[in-house]
Image: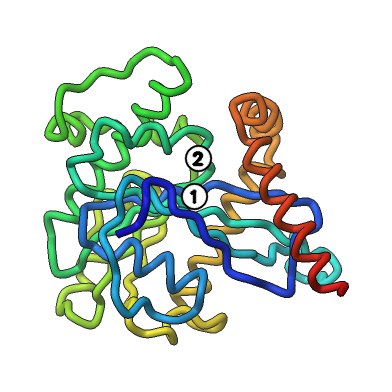
Amino acid sequence: MASLLDSSIHAHTLIPESGRSVKILVVGDSEVGKTSLVHLLCHKVPLSRPLYTTGCSLEVKVHEHFSDKTDVSSRELFYLEFWDIGGSIAYEKSRYLFYDSADGIVLVHDLTNRNSHDNLRKWLKGVLTDRNKVQGKKGHKYTNSDDYGKGFDAEIYTNSAMPAIIIGTKKDLSRSSNELISHSSLATDINAQVIAVNCRKASDFTPGAPEMQCLNAFFDKVICQKYYSQTSLPREEEISDLGSSRRGSWLRQFTQSLNSSFST
């Protein structure tokens, strides 16, 4: 069982010199395969024995971002922080602690369980309202998990300026994945890309795979939104005050230690 905030980082020979990072929330119902998805993304091999996530598990990978797709010299390296949020109702009242300063969100559902897809509205609304709670903003009001999905307003998401992607897992077990992808009303409402994956199959996550291309485009969008868009500039200063600088600090320390090990 993963600890409340279990952290690991995949060792790379490519290390971001700047230590710049983006925080990506991974949310969805319990047992939809969030941990298997994150593990495969970060370690490039399937997770043989997934465990229940207690609270939150943190994994980090390095992502190559090109500000100019036609210019190899424009390559920059960024840390992607995947905050895998436990889906159990036992952590419902404490999840908001992990939502602050999020830059992007991965909404995960099980293709063999339609309810897990329908519940993504609840998860998205919960993230948006709970982030307001942490940041001391007005408008946070709910009584239980059932209230989360009621009255979801896509405009609230649009105003949050937080990129999202919807991922259906267990593609190998589902016969209706294509239908669910093409008829996802939530994806239409929030203008999000939808993909289906098999977390037991590493080939879905190779650089040339369509699924990985969609994911890389999403990661690039999160990075651009935080570091390069005009609207993100004041937000970066605000996030730094809220604690992003502390995350960057430990990433820089990790970078320095790895660079030292490579030079010896």
Give residue 17's quadrant in the image: bottom right
Along the line of sight, which residue is nearer the eye, 145 or 152? 145
Q: Position of residue 220 (x, y in %)?
A: 61, 58
Q: Is 31 placed left or right of 22 in the picture?
A: left
Residue 164's disc is: none
- Give the residue number, with chain letter if any, for mark 1: 24
Graded by Cα atoms within 10 Å as few (under 14), some (14 to 19) or many (20 or more), the crowding at tag 2 reads: many
Q: Are marks 2 and 1 in contact (CB under 8 Å)?
A: yes
| Marks 2/1: CA–CA distance | 6 Å
Amino acid residing under circle 1:
Ile
Q: Is residue 87 left or right of residue 192?
A: left
- Residue 143 against residue 28 in the figure, above or below: above
Going 17% across and 42% down the picture, which residue do you hit?
89
The quarter of the image holding the C terminus is bottom right
Which residue occupies the foreground of this view, 163 or 89? Answer: 89
Tag 2 residue? 102
Outermost residue to the top: 138
Q: Quadrant of the N terminus?
A: bottom left
Quadrant of residue 141 within the rendered picture: top left
Residue found at x 28% / y 69%: 169
Q: Position of residue 175 (x, y in %)?
A: 15, 79
Mark 1 secondary-structure assignment: strand
The disc labelled 2 sits on which kind of residue?
Answer: Ala
Question: In this view of the protein, can residue 164 be seen by the observer?
Answer: no
Q: Total of numbered circles in the picture?
A: 2
Name the residue: 65% across, 34% down. 232
Q: Earlier in the sequence, mark 2 or mark 1?
A: 1
> Residue at position x 17%, y 80% from top?
173
- Image coordinates of residue 88 in percent, x first then y, are 20, 47
Look at the picture and state if 17 lies above or below 171: above
Residue 247 to residue 182: above or below: above
